[in-house]
C-alpha cells in the first residue's frame, strides 16, 4: 500500500468576495498549491474536487472538468458532494486511490461561492443539506437544527451558553495570526453572550460565517515525493467515513454524532493509532456546539465533558489538545465545499512547522481532521502524521 | 486485484412521474436490485450514488445519506456528480474500490427527478452542465450545443438529417420490448424528418426525452459472489474516465469527443481488449448525433463513418454491432443521474441472457457502456464481459 504525502497546500483567504467565481477562487488555491509543492501540472493524473451548492449559487454544475481547467490541468476530474463535507470526501477518495498504487499525483480540493447569495439566500441554500421533505418544509434551517442539538446536550449533560462562548473566544484567538482567516479579531465571552440570538441557545457568535473561498492540496505517493525531492514531511495515514439518518428526528440522540464516531474509529484503526495519540485536532465547528459533539464523537473528550474543554483550557492553543488552531470554521470561515480539504491543509502545515500557530504544537506528531455534512448525516475523519 | 461482478440490477420504469421524489424512485430501483441479487442489505459496505440536479429539481443536496436510507442500508454513502455521467462515475469508483479488496459489496446507482420542472425548466436546469459564464449566458442550451456539433460533423464528414433519423428509428425499435422504456413505440424516418426542429439540424425526434427514473446495481467481488452462490455471470472488467475543456468553443474539433476516446482507451486497456472485441454497446445518445460521435470516439466506427452505421444496418439489433439495444437515452429515456448505472444494468442483463433483447446478442461475450457529461467534457466507459 503506497503511503500518501501532502506535497503542497494552497488556500485563498476565506471571507466575502461576492464578485469572485468558484473557478477564480479554485484557480488561486491551486496555483498556490503548485507553487508550494514544486509538482508539475503535467504530472497530475486526476482532480478530486468538492463543491456543495454551485448549482444554486452560480447556476453551475459539472464543476469537475471546469475546475481542472481552472487549475491548468488536463486530467479527468470528479466532483464529490456531501454537503459541508464535500472536499473531505474528495480527500478520502484521493488517499484511497494513491494507496492502490494506480496514481502518484492527485490535485484535491474544493471551493464554494456563497456571499453573493446574501445571508438569507445562503441560509436557504445551505438548507438543502437537510431533509427537504421532513425538515426544510417544516421551517428548519441549520441554526435551528444545531440549536436543537445544543438544547438536547444541555438537557442530557448540563452546560450553558457561557461554556459554548469559550469555544468561540478560543477559535477567534487562534485565528489572530492566520492571514487566511475571515476574522482576525479577538472577542470576549461577553461579546458572545450579548450577541443577538439566532436560534436559542445559539447566538450570532456561536455560528460560523457565510464565506467564499477555496482550498487545494497536492497529494502524492511517498515514492513520488522521494523521487522528486519534494518537501513533504506530513503523511495522511488514516481515513474514515461515517453515515447516519438524514433527518434529526430519526436520530437516536440529538446530542450524539454516530457518523463522526464511525468515521473516527475507522480512521484511527486505519492509521493504527487511538484517540490518545492525537496531539492536535481541526474539527467541524459550524456552530460552537458542533465542536463539543465532534470532540466527544472522536473520543477526544468523554461523553458529557466536551462542553467544558475550551472553558477549562484543555483545547486552547496551549492546552493538552489544541483544537482548531486555524481558527476553525467559526473564525477562519466556512466556504463549505472548501472546508474539508482546508482542514487538511491547515493540519499539514501545523505539523510541518510552517503554520503561524505551529509554535503551539512544536512536539506534535499526530493530528486529526473532522469534516461533517449537514447535521452530521455524513462525516469524514483523517489522520495526519509527521513521517518518520 | 479482485474481480467485480454485477450481482443484481434494478431499474424503475423511465418516464414521467412528476409526483415521485428521487428517494422514492431510488428506493424502488434498489429494492429490485436486492431482490434480483439475493444480497443482504446488511452486507452492503457503502453506497455510491449519482445525481445531477437534485438541488434545482428537489431543493435537495446531500443525497448520499438520504439514498442509503431510502435503500434501507446503514453504510457510508457518497454522491458523485458529473452532469449526465454522474452514476457512470459512481460505477467507476465502485469498481475501483472492490478491486482493492477493501470492500466486497457496494450498492451503486443513481436517480433523477426532472419532469416536475416542465420541459423548459428541465432544459434550463440541464444547462448547468455547460459553462455558465461563457455558454449559458450567451443563450446556449444542450439542444443548441449538440446542433452545433451535428452541423460541424456534416461540414467535416458529410451526412444529413436522414442519416441521423435512422438512429432514432433504430433506438425506438430496440425499445419496443423493453418495459422500462419511456417510449415503446415504433417510429419511421419520415416521423423524425417531419418533427418540429428544435435546433437545426436537430428535430424533436433527434432528442432524448426529459425523464424521471432510477437505477441500482449490486456490485460484488467475485469471491463474495462465489461464496454466496450468487447468480452473477457478468463481470465489469474495464473502466475508463476522460475529461475535456468545459466549453465547446475551447474544443479542438466540435465533432470529436477526446474525453470519450480517452475513457474508451483506458477501459479497453484495463480489460485487456480492443475495440474489435466489442460485441454490443450502450452509448450516450442524448441526441442522435451523440451516438455517432460516441461510436467514433470508441473506435467502433472509423472517423467520419459513424453517421451511416444505423442507416446501413451495422448497429441495428441484428447488425454486426448492436448499439443501444435498451432503446438508448433516445427511447428508453434519460433521467440523467440514473443513466450511467442503468446502461450497466442493461448491458449486464443483455450479456446474461435475461434482457428482452438478449436474443439479438446470443453469442456476445463483451459489451461496452459509454456515459457522457455535458457536451462530453466528462466521459465514463465500462467494459462488461461474460465471466469465464
Image (cartoon, coloured by chain):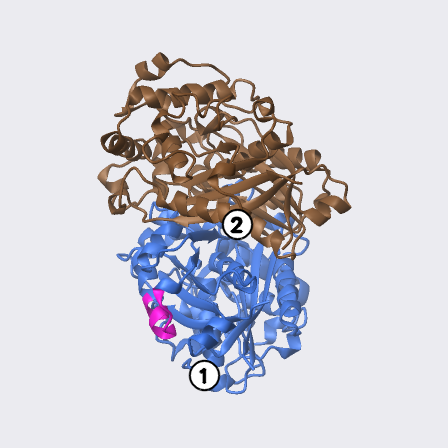
Chain colours: A brown, B blue
Which residue is disc 1 drawn over?
B353
Q: Point out the residue furthest to the front here.
A: A276
Name the chain letter of the residue that bears numbered label 2: A
User: In the rendered view, would you say A355 is above or below B68?
Assistant: above
Is residue B207 in sight in this rendering? no
Q: Please state if B269 lies on the left or on the right of A115 as rendered.
A: right
What span is colored magenta in the figure? B31-41
* Label 2 packing within 10 angstroms: few (<14), some (14-19), many (20+): some
Relative depth, front residue between A166 and A185: A166
Secondary structure at badge 2 equals helix
- Picture coordinates of residue B104, whole percent (x, y): 47, 65
Q: Is residue B34 magenta?
A: yes
Name the chain letter of the residue that bears numbered label 1: B
- Picture coordinates of residue B181, whole percent (x, y): 37, 71
User: In the rendered view, would you say B355 is above or below A124?
Assistant: below
Q: Is residue A251 magenta?
A: no
- Would you say the magenta stretch is mainly helix, strand or loop? helix
Which residue is disc 2 drawn over?
A270
Residue occupying image coordinates x 27% and y 25%: A201
Amino acid at each position: 500500500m503506497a503511503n500518501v504525502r501532502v506535497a503542497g497546500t494552497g488556500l485563498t483567504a476565506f471571507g466575502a468576495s461576492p464578485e469572485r467565481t468558484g473557478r477564480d477562487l479554485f484557480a488561486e488555491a491551486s496555483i498556490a498549491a503548485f507553487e508550494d509543492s514544486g509538482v508539475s501540472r503535467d504530472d497530475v493524473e486526476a482532480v478530486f474536487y468538492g463543491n456543495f451548492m454551485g448549482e444554486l449559487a452560480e447556476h453551475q454544475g459539472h464543476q469537475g472538468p471546469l475546475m481542472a481547467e481552472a487549475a491548468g490541468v488536463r486530467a479527468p476530474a470528479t466532483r464529490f458532494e456531501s454537503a459541508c463535507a464535500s472536499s473531505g470526501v474528495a480527500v478520502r477518495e484521493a488517499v484511497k486511490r494513491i494507496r492502490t498504487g494506480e496514481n502518484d499525483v492527485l490535485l484535491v480540493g474544493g471551493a464554494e461561492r456563497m456571499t453573493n447569495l446574501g445571508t438569507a439566500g445562503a441560509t436557504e441554500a445551505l438548507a438543502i443539506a437537510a431533509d427537504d421533505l421532513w425538515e426544510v418544509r417544516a421551517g428548519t434551517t441549520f441554526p435551528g437544527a444545531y440549536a436543537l442539538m445544543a438544547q438536547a446536550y444541555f438537557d442530557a449533560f448540563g452546560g450553558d451558553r457561557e461554556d459554548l462562548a469559550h469555544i468561540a473566544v478560543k477559535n477567534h484567538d487562534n485565528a489572530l495570526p492566520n492571514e487566511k482567516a475571515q476574522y482576525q479579531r479577538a472577542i470576549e465571552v461577553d461579546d458572545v453572550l450579548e450577541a443577538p440570538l439566532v436560534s436559542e441557545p445559539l447566538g450570532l457568535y456561536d455560528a460560523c460565517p457565510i464565506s467564499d473561498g477555496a482550498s487545494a492540496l497536492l497529494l502524492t505517493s511517498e515514492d513520488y515525493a522521494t523521487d522528486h525531492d519534494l518537501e513533504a514531511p506530513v503523511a495522511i495515514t488514516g481515513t474514515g467515513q461515517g453515515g447516519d439518518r438524514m433527518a434529526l428526528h430519526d436520530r437516536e440522540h440529538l446530542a450524539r454524532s454516530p457518523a463522526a464516531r464511525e468515521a473516527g474509529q475507522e480512521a484511527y484503526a486505519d492509521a493504527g493509532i487511538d484517540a490518545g495519540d492525537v496531539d492536535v485536532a481541526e474539527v467541524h465547528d459550524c456552530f460552537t456546539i458542533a465542536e463539543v459533539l465532534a470532540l466527544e464523537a472522536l473520543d477526544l473528550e468523554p461523553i458529557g465533558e466536551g462542553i467544558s474543554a475550551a472553558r477549562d483550557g484543555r483545547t486552547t492553543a496551549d492546552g493538552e489538545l489544541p483544537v482548531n488552531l486555524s481558527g476553525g470554521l467559526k473564525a477562519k470561515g466556512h466556504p463549505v465545499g472548501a472546508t474539508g480539504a482546508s482542514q487538511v491543509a491547515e493540519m499539514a502545515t501545523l505539523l510541518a512547522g510552517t503554520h503561524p500557530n505551529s509554535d503551539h504544537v512544536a512536539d506534535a506528531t499526530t493530528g486529526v481532521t473532522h469534516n461533517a455534512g449537514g447535521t452530521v448525516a455524513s462525516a469524514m475523519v483523517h489522520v495526519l502524521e509527521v513521517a518518520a
